[in-house]
Image (spheres, rainbow, N blue to C red):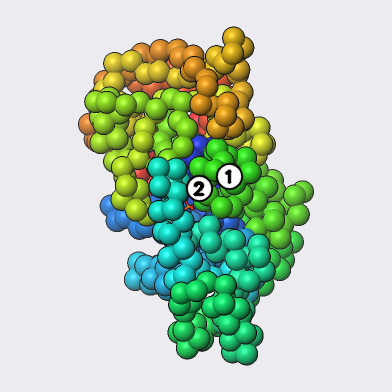
Amino acid sequence: MVGVPAIVIVGLQFGDEGKGKISYLLCRDADCVVRFQGGANAGHTVVVDGRKFKFNMLPAGSMAGATACIASGTVVDLEEVFEELEILRSAGIKSGFMISRAANIVLPIHKELDAKIEEARGGKAVGTTRRGIGPTYSDRALRTGIRIEDLLDEERLREKLEILRKMHSSGVDSLEKLLEYGRRLSPYIGDVEIFVNDLLDRGGKVVFEGAQGTLLDIDHGTYPYVTSSNTIAGAACTGCGIGPTRINEVVGVMKAYTTRVGAGVFPTEIGGELGERIREAGQEYGTTTGRPRRVGWLDIPLLRYAIRISDVSWIALTKLDVLSGLEKLKICIGYEVDGRRLELAPPSVRLLENVKPIYVELDGWGRLSEEEWRRIAERGWDSMPDEARAYVEFVEEKLGKPIKLVSIGAEVGMEVER
Ligand code: IMO
Ligand code: MG
């Protein structure tokens, strides 16, 4: 996988597609890796040499040594940043780090509001991560947000906190605490946007590590059951000040099945014992919140939509091993709705609540031991079980984009290129 200069990684489903591992793989020859949207709602995991590293705020690709950047389109949980810098340090990783002066900060009040709004919604709750994402983006849009650079300016910070205090009746955060964060963070604060553009000019390689997934995009997802940022490939441009023509490649990451954590429509959801079995096999519990994830079959109409709006160049398919041992595997290849057939579907809740998935059934393959998978990873694509190859080839044909990488398991090294 010799990389091109500017690659955007984007989730093609409802998040948790395994973007952390793919980012690590693509960052091995990168100079810099950027988080450009979202905040500590993300949970990106990398397993290297049997050791597991979890990132919520820093890009997981920084484990490969690329300079970690947090760009202006994010909402920043400062405690997380310090904790995760410590993860890198104690793992002996010498990645540089830069955070945009223009990124907005998540305050305790935003987390409180997140929880309060969820409670107010009652049965209609979104099931947020309660990391304060929505309220922080709201304050940004209202122009009342606190930015990283404000932490270096006591007068301005005082004024802004005063406004926030009047807006939100409960406590905001102490001025002192925020100034202390500013002092600790000051060596890393910079113009990420200029740094990244200059790096690209000099022939450097940059990976833009998207968080969440296309179907959670605030505009292009299953609104209102979405996150509060744009998650599609184009968000790398707005979130990091990159001109659209700079992007060379968009890598779409998808799981071999579908999962969703939190509420919202899910046409291919699998209930009962089978759902339970896949959840256990895939260890489908939230990295950030520990919640059990809902599981379902692959949904080609929604994937086609996701691929379309991010103009995906190629696909990385993850967790194929999880489907092992199931006799039959279903794939939704279209929807029936009002007597029409849809091959590609926008994630409109109104539409998706009324569709009937059309399934095809493929043969499964037997359960393989970890040792057997390891051998497959060493020997490559041709050593995969025939039915597993047929599954991947079927999906590739339906999506019309090459699946260049198939990942089996969480560990780096457990994957095959095609
Ligand atoms: P990664 O980067 C999966 C979901 C939440 C909830 C909705 C809104 O690991 O793929 P929010 O806290 O963002 O306001 O919650 O979005 N969600 C995710 N689901 N993976 C994520 O990130 C997610 N980030 C948010 O569960 O349904
Ligand atoms: Mg997650």
As rendered, which of 189 and 266 lies closer to the eye?
Answer: 266
Element type at marker 2? loop
Left or right: 219 as drawn, with respect to 382: right
Element type at marker 1? loop
- Relative height, residue 259 to residue 73 (above, below): above
Q: Identify which residue is drawn at 53% across, 27% down.
A: 352
Left or right: 382 as drawn, with respect to 324: right
Q: Identify which residue is drawn at 59% across, 46% down.
A: 218
Screen quadrant of the N terminus: top right
Mark 2 neighbour density, 10 Å: few (under 14) some (14–19) many (20 or more) = many
Q: Which residue carries the number 2 mark?
A: 212
- Relative height, residue 202 to residue 149 (above, below): above
Amino acid at circle 2: Gln
Whole-percent x, y for residue 253 in the image: 51, 39
As rendered, which of 347 and 365 lies closer to the eye?
Answer: 347
Whole-percent x, y for residue 43 in the image: 41, 53
Whole-percent x, y for residue 90 in the image: 34, 71
Q: CA distance from mark 1 to mark 2?
A: 8 Å
Mark 2 Cβ and ligand 1 under 8 Å apart: yes
Q: Quadrant of residue 99?
A: bottom right
Q: Is residue 417 visible?
A: no
As rendered, which of 310 and 365 lies closer to the eye?
Answer: 310
Q: Identify which residue is drawn at 51% across, 59% down.
A: 133
